Image (tube, helix red, strand yellow):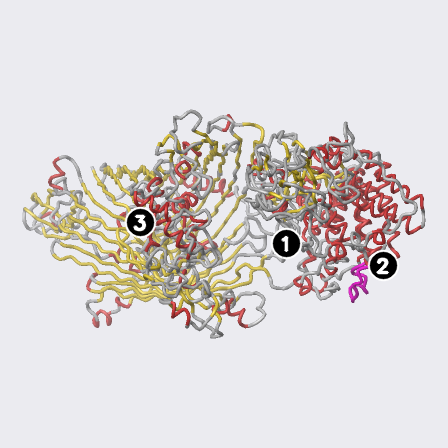
Amino acid sequence: MKTIKYLLFVALVSTLITACNDLELEPKGILAENLLFKSEVGVQQYFARVYVSLPIEDFNYYQGEGYKKEGNAWEGQKNSPSSVCLEGNGRGENMDAGYYWPYSEIRYVNTFLSEFPNYRDNYTEADYEALMSEGYFIRAFYYFGLVKRFGGVPLISYPQDPKADSDSLKVPRSTEYDTYKFIYRDLKYAMEHGSTDKKRTTRGTAYAAAALMSRVMLYAASSANYGWTVGTTGPAVNAGLMIIPQEYAEEFYQYAYDACKFLHDAGFKLHTAGDAETAFVETMTNDTEEDIFVKRFGNVTTLEAGGNRNTGLFHSWDAMTMPLGTGLSSSVGCALQGCWESAKLFQMPAIVDEDGKPIRFNNPSELWNTDEMEGRARATFFFSGMTEPVSGEKMDFQAGIFKTYGDHTQADGCPYGGSNDFTNENRVIGGDNETLNGMRINGRYGMVTNHGDEGWNYMGIGVRKYVGTTTSRGRELHQSSTNWKVLRYGEVLCNWAEAAYELGSLRGDESLKQEAVAHINELHARAGARPYVYKADAQNVNEIDAEQYPYSYNVDENLQYIRDERVRELCFENQRYWDLRRWRVYHDLFQSTIAHCLSCYYVLDEDKYIFLPDEPTMNSYRRTFYSSQYYKQIGDDEINKNDLIIRNDGF
Amino acid sequence: MLAALPGLSQQREVQGLVTDSAGEPVIGATIRVKGTDKATITDMNGLFTIQASTKDKLNISFVGYLDAVVAASQNKLKVTLHEDTHLLDDVVVVGYGTQRKATLTGAVASINNKEMTVTKNENTVNMLAGKIPGIRVTQSSSQPGEFNSKIDIRGMGAPLIVVDGIPRDQAYFSRMDANEIENVSVLKDASAAIYGVRAANGVILVTTKHGTGLKNGKFDITFSANYGLQSFLYLPETASAAEHIMLYNEKVNNNLSSNTYPQRLGNGLKSYKDMFYYTSHGISGTNWTKEMFDSTSPQEQYNVSLNGSSQKIDYFFNVGYMKQMGSYKSHSMNYNRWNFRSNVDARITDRLKAIVSLSGYQDEKNQPYTDIWSVYKKAWTYRPTASPYLNGNTDYPSKDPDFTEEANPVTEIDSDYSGFRRERRYNFNGAMTLQYDFKYVKGLSAKAFYSYDYYTTDNHNYQKEYSLYRLNDPTKGIDEPGNLVSLPQNSGKSYVRRWTDPSHSTDLQLSLNYNRTFGSHKINALLLYEEQYNTWDNFSAQRNMLLSTEYLFAGDTDGMAGSSSGVGDITRKAWVGRLNYDYQGKYLAELAFREDASSRWADGKRWGFFPSVLIGWRASEERFVKKLIPFLSNLKFRLSYGEMGDDGAAGTYPPTVVGYNLNNDYGWYYTEGTLTTGVTPTAIPNPDLTWYKSKLYNAGVDFELWNGHLGGTIEVFKRNRSGLLDRSNRTIPGTVGADLPLENMNSDITFGWEISLYHRHRIGELGYQVMGQISAAKNRWDTRANNQGSNSMSNWYDVNRSGRNMDIWFSIEEGGRFTSYEEIQKHTTIGTNYGTGTLPGDYWYKDWNGDGVVDGNDNHPVATYNLPVFNYGLSLSADWRGIDLSMNWQGSAGIYNLYDEVFTEVCPFNGGAALDIYLDRWHTKNLTDDPWNPHTEWVSGYYPATGHSFNIGTTGIQNTSYIRLKTLELGYSLPKKWLGKVGIKDLRVYANAYNLLTITGIKNMDPERPGHQGGANNGTETSILFYNYPVNRSFNFGATLKF
């Protein structure tokens, strides 16, 4: 009996235990699709991956390389696109747009677009449409990253089954026109159905879609209007895979125009506050009503703590652009500096008189501490003598001393001396803390002869745009968290002006051209610059100054001014590199081209200061853009896998 | 009917003394009058008294000794028991049971506690090295608490480790207290197949001790203590300040691109003038290794175990504590561990038995916040001209401008300055077994086993803010007002991070056993059902610390973070069956199967069937063989075939649908400061995915001659795995945006052999045994689905192709050295390491393809990667009158390492310190000679002229084969007649050395130190493990005391 009792006990225990374990386990640590798609929070979590990987050329974007830079992205500032289009100067020498083939991200969005309709019942109609629109916005952004490099690309609009027959998976390239139209349809949908919450600046709202539309459609229109001027021919051009036929230029300018108007009608305005300088600094570093789409950055320490360092959502802009110094950069420093090519486009006092002689200033601050310089310029650059507001440090970039300059013009120059030459020549430059007749030879943060290209300013112009305006996180490497303005109304006005003017030209409509100038002047009002006066009898700039504007097609003075406005408004926002490409003027402008400084010298015998546009002593790269670089070649890797792909021409 | 006959004889008292061959009394030996129930045991002095008639025979037995039978013809008897060296009757633990060694059909090797614990080490894995044929062990570090030795069986990959029936990992096994281990069995062939889906790489079975061998009411208490002194086996030393300046100047001058002759003052270099300053003042500069490391560090281990029996209960209880101090002078690196185990066997009824096992461990590993590799790198690269402290004042650690990196290593090794990393592990296990012998079916028994295991960690990182110091004016004192500058380190980066990984698992086994002999037929059958469940989780929390405290609660809520990764669970179920058949101990067969299911695979692919067949023939039992070779005590031929599976390469859950994993690499700030972490899709589903299958073939011969005086085993084996996971080489356009899923595609082969031989003998009071073993294993791709290279040359270079051996190392081969300018001038090839910068002493390389240029095209197989191809060991032990001596040699051959940085370059990292080994180098006769002048006279040396690193081709790839005296132990057991008087049963004292002696071809390097590439790593891995904490030598002293 006793035995049976034990046996029963054993049997009972065994049965109880056995019943517990199942071979069909609900996966832990894995989120099922339905968990993500049935709530807005879940969709945002799903979108996080494709938002952070968007082809946004932010602080960390390294010219020639992919987007989302993980971890240490300091080469982003060193090799900024600004550096190869002479908005600034740094080590950037690579004119290449970089290879980009984000089809796994596109697949990810396509998966959403094809599966999300199954979850329609979980949402109100408006919320459902807003989320679908967000998906279309993201997909359009990725295709924009492709089309601006390659022209027409294979258009994949649903997630293909990789296990299907290989041949059925092959998709040929669409024409460049069709590719832009595909993006147009996605963005149009998003404009019409997207969220109209202006506070959602980190998401693809109807407004983000419209702002992106205004940008993308200008690219399309430019390809149509000017693509032919480069003269590339071949099978891909014939098939329409690269270069849009000119007849479509008007269509695309109109789309861009409409998108800008859409935003204007929605009530978007430029941010204004107090003086122009403050307003513009705030526009770039604060959240303002001008924001349409913003990429936010965070605290590297917090990111690291959460294991999120590889999101790359931190940057080193302050440490990399400011000079080395207490309260300024604590390491590297000055990896990107301003240059005269961009600065001189701003409204500022002349540095030479009518005879070409350098104008004498009693003090370097006379250059900038005057209404002659627009506030926007002071908000974009640091000039010698300006005070960095956070540290209170004076940005002294003085390049050297002229013992005498005499009657020389800026062009023929006063004979320079060799470095460290105190005796024979007129110009004296020196090392740290060296003096001449009791006067400091170089500025505290200026070029010195005994340092390399980093840490000290050798261009005479520093970068101010995007530099943080609070000290809370210091200015060490990786410690910057200023947000990146991906799309803002300031750009929209630039886009609008260009679209309106080009439409006016194409249609012979003066009123559209004048409207364009009005948009520019809206920007000027905020910038603290004098209004631009429309030139009814504008000449072609290549006829006025063929050396400065060696274009292969005609651009009139008004249009050139409208184009230059993009430098003034969008300097260091990594737009100009692509603008020069889409206008097809890059190869004309960049033939062994070198950046220039705004060197500030003290003239000893006169006790005055002069500014000279020297060639830089550091990073004096001569940059050349070849006409073959307007389109990137599709990778052999892809062509080997898909024989339907036609290569681009011109290589 | 005549059973009462003996009773007729006259009964009287017989007295006797039982001793062992050393003359020591045997305590507790059983004396039984044959054919009766009468029995007694010997007392503390080995004496017994028993009633017997003159015609009776007495059987005297004791564990570990051969039974002795003596006639009770005399009243005073003296009996000597001989140790049982004939091990054929030993019982060997196999999967889910035991077998007699004599009739074992599988390739199973085992070692017992004594063989294992003769090696004194904190890591049980290291105790196996060199002792079991087919086991490969490489110890890459002796860092306290690191346990990073690599082990595999026959080159097959990470083995399954089963401790008392519960699957474990190497981390658990490494941390076991060796004193609680009864024996370790290694299943190397089809005998492992009974473990099915996880047995493809072989199985290591560990059995812990149970209460045995003692009679009713008796118990032993054993106390053992071991104290060791560890020192580094090989620690490179750096050259003195003057030598460093000389070597660095030489380096700069011997390099064409930096040569500054005749100026002799490189950019930022210390000049010869500085060098003379050090030599003339007799200052050798800072020896960073001496500043940072102790020359010896203690290690202690204590154990108390209780072994006993009462009426119905046998019990074994062990508690152990060990503490190991690391080498850091700060004592911030150390490790300690508590182990306990309690095994209680209860005979509830005659037929029902219960075993209750409780066990656990808790350990703590401490180290400063800075990684080990970074510390060793600094020890060997920080210049001797830099000082760790201001003016030698240890209160003021310096920030010397001569540091090669930011930090000061003496503060980095000290938790009081820079913070710490602490890891604690907790494991608790409870298991119960019920075993019932059926009444009506003889030989049938049922068994139920259930185990619950809980494991968690408690980890704590603390990066701390602290200060280094500098003097404004170095010529003035520290006390000078305003002269001392405090430089905060980790400023604003002080943080505390805590994390834990709780997990638990259960294991249920229900089995039926049938064990019966019918005449000459012996049958043993097993049917078993097993179910395992394992679940794990983890989370962490972090706060920035404004206050200087290690407690999380005191941290700042701003910037606080928490995260979790790696949650999951697995269920496994299996049916196991086995039938052993034995005819007269002569013809042996075993048939077994396992039907295994894993939740890692999708429904329909979940269950797998793994059969095995083992047969054996004991030729020595055949009459004709016995006649032919009378001195042959055993000759057995074995053949086995088994199939096994492996799910190790699969994800935790079956790939049936696309799910999403949280992926920290992605995230988006939808609102300021709040990161939404992204997700990434799991792979494209392949519901057909299943385990890969191993087929294991083994043939072996066991033999023993002259009753155990000579014996051995020879084995050959081959394993063929198929269905290894890979992605199809079918190309799909990149525009699909997804990779093809993993499929079961490739196959490979592992093959090799093992030989072991032993000799045991006893001459008078001297007993000794010698055991030697050697094994070899190689891996080869059988079929591999991959794209062909563009030409046959690139195919040849790619070893990862069908039919190619794995782990082949391609490189260029050193041809020799230039010994004069003339040889350089007349050299006929161009390319690698030869050019205008070549100097006497430099190496030249073979132009293997004969095209006149030495470059990548001259690469050819020169070495192998991965764990050593050949492993061997030699064990010797002897005893004489209570003195015992053990020696354990372990070695490996066919292993190569490529070192880097400090080990292949003088003054790396812009003039860091130089190791003193480089003083033995080619150099110009006079310091100031121009190395580029062909008339300059050179002095030859071991290393080339120092201008560049020497890690190219086979110059860099070093053969790190070695043989090492892992263990040398000398012990003395005090005579029992002395001990008995104070109530002690046994007392043994010993002295022991670990890694006493190494014989190797490699110079200036410990052969087990991991390289930058090669060694126990596979071909694609490169690492900085050459900055590992070195392997130890230790001297141990200890005693075992048994009451």
* Nearer to the camera, B765 or B642: B765
Q: Which residue is mark 1?
A: B684
Which amino acid, by three-letter code, is at mark 3?
Leu
**Residue B36 x/y as whole percent:** 17, 47
Q: Magenta segment range?
A: A229-245
Front: mark 3 or 2: 2
Taking the magenta stretch, the answer to whether it contains residue A412 is no
Task: Let me know if marks 3 and 2 both belong to one chain.
Answer: no
Q: Which residue is mark 2?
A: A245
Q: Which residue is mark 3?
A: B233
Task: Let me know if marks 1 and 3 both belong to one chain.
Answer: yes
User: Residue A2 appears in which quarter of the rendering?
Assistant: top left
Which secondary structure class fits the magenta region best?
loop
**Pointer 2 indicates a residue of which chain?**
A
Front: mark 1 or 3: 3
* Mark before the other along the chain sequence, 1 or 3: 3
Front: mark 1 or 2: 2
